[in-house]
Structure formats: C-alpha cells, structure tokens
Amino acid sequence: MKRKALWIVGIGVLGSLAMLTAGQGFAIENDGSPKCSVATLKGRYLFAAQGLVFAPDQTEPAVAASVAGIHVFNGDGTGHDLVTLTLDGIDQHVPNPNNLTYTLNSDCTGTYAVTGTPLTFAVFVSPTGDEVTTINTNAGASSSYPPSRRVWPK
C-alpha cells in the first residue's frame, strides 16, 4: 500500500512539473481566434529572399538583390539580424549584427524595422510563433520572404 501511494505522489509531482515547464505560445480570444503579442515572436529564424532595388528617381534599371540571414527576436519588441546581401551578384559587406524593433498586433500582424536604416517590413506570424513571413514596405525596394521557421527557441 505504501508503494502504491508513493507512485501516485510521484506521478502527481511529475505531472505538476510538466505543467510548470510547458509555456503557452499564444492566447485564445473569446471568439476562438488566436491572440499574439511581441512575446509570440521569440527565437532564431532563418530567412532568404530575392528582389529588386529601384533607383530613387527610377531612371536607371532595377538591380537584382538577394539576401539571406538570421532574425533573432527577443520576445520584447527588440532583436537583431545577421545578414548577407548581394546586389547584382556583388557582396555588399553588411555590418552585423543589425539591431531591429518590431510590433505585433493581437491578430498576429505587425511591423519590423532595422534600426538606423530606412528598411521597414510588414510582418505576419503564426499564432504559435513558429513561423514568420515579411514583405518590404519602403519605397524603392520590392522583396517578400517566404515563411521562415523558428530554428531555435532563444
């Protein structure tokens, strides 16, 4: 009988610990829709895209651009990027890291900006924060990023 009681207590303790360590990635609204916040977007995300860069007065032909890197979101509206950028196949030697700020609305849409640059993006995040996709929103550039998966939670 004593052994059975110890097993029951042990299972209860393990179950309690499991509930304490499990974090909720998102909240649910009363209508059943997901609710995001800046905390939803946290971790490391790989990304890559191709696009075009236009001259400010658009008198010159557009230049092909490719970019790849890692977004690191801190879960508090800040983070940084590690980036490689090429224009017409020439490495632009982007200094790294590039600090960023972001907002995230309850409907899992938001904005993202690279500090000290004119680069701005619209952000769309899965309710769990496991995927993010962005599109460039500043004039003179045209690029969108396919969904990027979180590859590391921190």
Image (cartoon, grey):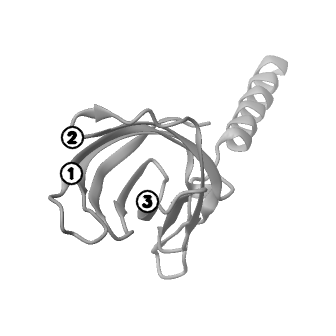
SS class, disc 1: strand
Q: Residue at x 27, y 63 (%)?
A: 55
Q: Quadrant of the N terminus?
A: top right
Kindly identify the amino acid type of the residue bearing the numbered disc 3: Val
Could you classify mark 1 by the number of other residues whose Cα lies within 10 Å: few (under 14), some (14-19), or many (20 or more)? some
- Label number found at residue 125: 3
Residue 66 can be seen in this image: yes
In primary-sequence order, the first of circles 2 and 3 is: 2
Residue wearing tag 1: 63
- Percent from the top left, x then y, of residue 41? 55, 53
Residue 74 can be seen in this image: no
Is residue 45 found left or right of 18 in the rendered image? left
Q: Quadrant of the C terminus?
A: top right
Q: How many numbered circles are shown? A: 3
Q: Residue at x 50, y 67 (%)?
A: 111
Task: Identify the residue at the far top of this view.
Answer: 3
- Label number found at residue 148: none
Find the distance from the CA under tag 2 to the CA under tag 3.
30 Å
Q: Residue at x 54, y 36 (%)?
A: 95
Residue wearing tag 2: 88
Could you classify mark 2 by the number of other residues whose Cα lies within 10 Å: few (under 14), some (14-19), or many (20 or more)? some
Relative to the observer, which residue lies in front, 109 or 96?
96
Q: Are marks 2 and 1 in contact (CB under 8 Å)?
A: yes
Q: Residue at x 55, y 66 (%)?
A: 36
Find the distance from the CA under tag 2 to the CA under tag 1.
6 Å
Could you classify mark 3 by the number of other residues whose Cα lies within 10 Å: few (under 14), some (14-19), or many (20 or more)? many
- Percent from the top left, x then y, of residue 99? 61, 48
Kindly identify the amino acid type of the residue bearing the numbered disc 1: Val
Task: Check the image and report above or below for 52 versus 149.
Answer: below
Displayed quadrant of residue 93: top left
Relative to the observer, which residue lies in front, 150 or 135?
135
